[in-house]
Image: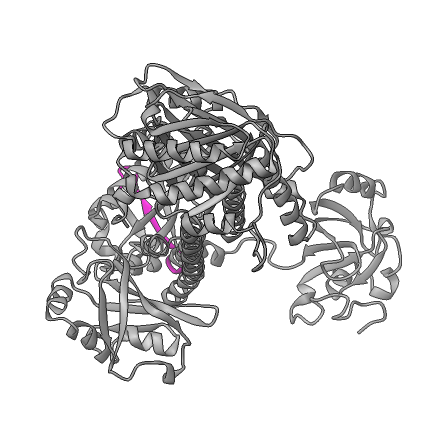
Amino acid sequence: MAQGACGPLDDPWAEVPDEAATARAILDPAATVTCWNDGARRLLGRPAEEVVGRPVAELLADPEALSRVARAARGKPRWHGTLEVLHRTGRALPVRVIAHRLTDADWGPPGWLVVTPLEGLEATGADADLPRDAFRHAPNALALYDTAVRLRRANLAMEAVLGLREDDIRGLRLSEIGGKRQSMELENQVRQVAEEGRPRDVRTRLRTGGERREHAWMGRLAPIRDAQDHLVAVALSAVDLSTEDEARSRLQLINDAGTRIGTTLEVDRTAQEFADVCVPRLADFVSVDLLQEPRDPGADTDWPAEGHVRLRRIAHCSSTPGTPEAMLPIGAVWDHPMAAGTVHALLSGEAVTVVRGEPGFLAWVAQDPERGRHAADLGVHSILAVPLTSRRKTLGVALLLRYRRPDRFAPDDVLLAREIASRAAVSLDNAQRFTRERDTALALQRSLLPRTLPQLSGVDVAHRYLAASGHSGVGGDWFDVIALSGARVALVVGDVVGHGVQASATMGRLRTAVRTLSDVDLPPDELIAHLDDLVVRLAEETGGGESAGDIGATCLYAVYDPVSGTCSMARAGHPPPVVASPDGATVTTLDVPAGPPLGLGGLPFEAAEFVLAPGSVLALFTDGLVERRQRDVDAGYRALHLALARPADTLDDRCAAVLDALLQNEPPTDDVALLMAATRVLDARHVVTWDVPHEPAACATARRGVAEQLDRWGLSEAAFTTELVVTELLTNAIRHATGPVKLRLILDDTLICEVSDTSATSPHMRRASSFDEGGRGLMLVAQLAQRWGTRHSPTGKTIWAEQQRPDRSGEG
């Protein structure tokens, strides 16, 4: 090679056999020649060692031409035109030049590649024959139609597509050649090109050449003009894009599977979504069967030896109305023989395909004679069984059938089915795990919420609890009804923000705390204050940077006294209750002071007392009842007022009517707890009160009054026990407290004795020694009464004791 000539590392054409038929030079960014091939030497008579390293402008007849070319090529990847170059003899030669801009990604350093042909510049007689031969042997399917849209020419590729020779179809219209609806649509496109004279692209799907399989075609229609610019024909060029179209369809199906499968955490819904995605784009029928318990694929020892595998049908879908392929309803459990393709897929963890006539196909139809008849009637010819595997566990199997689509399951179809099944299996596994966790949490919640509410003489109660839609069904809303001393009743509704086991556990602790505090008979505001302190301590115990306010709990605590007909209540961040008059004519939202939510700590709570007429309906609820995204709280309360005003046969009917009116048959967006109580009042015949002088002799007088009252109530059998209890309680009050002292008997479901005094000191039961003269009174009361206790009031305390009524001694 001459010095300065381009080697193969500098010029990739250096080793081409006829490379000298092109004059070629490479310039650096400064327009200096860096490579000069033998064709360039032939063109200008200058050897490489004479040119390489010199500015290319010295080779131009007009040096200013280089500046003009640089301006024209600025920012462009290529320039072409005619330049006059200087031969070694000094004569100017006009040559056609193409200059390509080179970058680092091309042959090497940036610069320009300049080329001009030296041979084959003039057309020859052989060139005239090339268009005819090129048309005949072109790889694309080509056809020419005259202005009447009748075929004149078709190349070999078009003959292969149509399955007909050019001589067989010349003179026919396109619709007559294809004989299908799509053929007529394509013919109309050709006619429009002939009329308008403008090219256009068309896409269509056709079965051609007698094939049963449909192809996707991309067609280009172009008008053909003669030398006088008259339209003489329309050319049709068709490219089979079936492979690309199928790949695009598969990608679209995978994308749809990602968005449509797993929209919920319901196992059955997820399986149905998988089946719906696959039909009809991948199969004509799809069924999904799950194992009773997930298993390790490939572990033979884990599988039963009974000769079958038990599966449960949870979803199926068919392109045929009525789903004739499904031999079992959804939810049915059935046994698959070990020879079936579905079982092979389960055992191996791999997809299994069987076609008509194979043993696996025969085993599938042999499971049920009716299935075999259906398979024959439908023409089922191909089966694909895909295991549903997630986290190294096989959950079940999906069965895909084809009978409308003529093609069998190809390897690409198997890969596609496995990809979709893999995504569906992850969603199914998540749904199963969620279901197990939800069942556990629901069991926890059911154990924490009251299963039955006590039957009390002071109130009739009804309740409802609804979980928010889209959640686990486990929340932190709760309610309770607690029997208190003196025939009083506590009504409680609370709400812990959030869902799941954590919210239920917190709810359970708060409900237990309320029950414990209610046993102490604290007033509502004091009980709420103690509950607030508990939430603060709970947050401190959990740690992790969680503050008490993060728990997000609210509560409403109300105490109704059927003797006085009053209801005292306090709330901590909870919606105020609503009360309806006995006739429903008046519905009022009670003005209970709004305390802060539980857990803020150190802030006061206030109680309010209301007088409720007998038969009033008190409604306590969580915010999910009155608050919704499309409705503000005020509108919710108005709807609640209207619902409570409507008459109902029973309190339970009214409770259901309230939910129907406010939720409007839509699942709630937040948990809803509703507790309704219809009030009663104990009349004077059931309550007797005595003022007892502060002297020991008053005990005898009180005993006689109690005995007479019991006789009037028909409870003389209880006189001896009641007198002992009254004596001990009065003696304790007269001895250790200052007057005045009051004695009250209440005839309720139990017989209640109450002694009130002005002392704030609570009595304590103690064990008296043999030589003590006192200290046995409360021990005696505890033995005689079913239960006893003390409650405090702003003026002192009340000691109470409940006994079983003799007339109800046989009641459980």
Q: Which color scheme did the rendering employ for the protein? A: one colour
| Pick the front one: 604 or 662 | 604
Relative to 369, residue 798 above or below: above
Residue 47 in picture, x, y percent from top left: 83, 65
| Pick the front one: 808 or 668 | 808
Q: Residue furthest top?
A: 585
Q: For the point 83% across and 51% down, which residue is it?
A: 29
Q: Quadrant of residue 737 in the image?
A: top right
Q: Residue furthest front?
A: 697
Relative to 781, residue 566 above or below: above
Residue 793 in picture, x, y percent from top left: 56, 31
Q: Is residue 229 left or right of residue 210?
A: right
Residue 499 in picture, x, y percent from top left: 50, 47
Observer able to see residue 731: yes
| Pick the front one: 278 or 697 | 697
**Residue interval drawn in magenta:** 136-150
Q: For the point 49% across and 43% down, which residue is it?
A: 728
| Pick the front one: 324 or 375 | 324
| Quadrant including the N terminus | bottom right
Observer able to see residue 228: no
Q: Is residue 209 magenta?
A: no
Q: Is residue 696 left or right of residue 371?
A: right
Count numbered badges in the picture.
0
Residue 243 in picture, x, y percent from top left: 40, 59
Q: Quadrant of residue 686 in the image?
A: top left
Q: Quadrant of residue 704 in the image?
A: top left
Q: Is residue 149 magenta?
A: yes
Q: Is residue 303 left or right of residue 775?
A: left
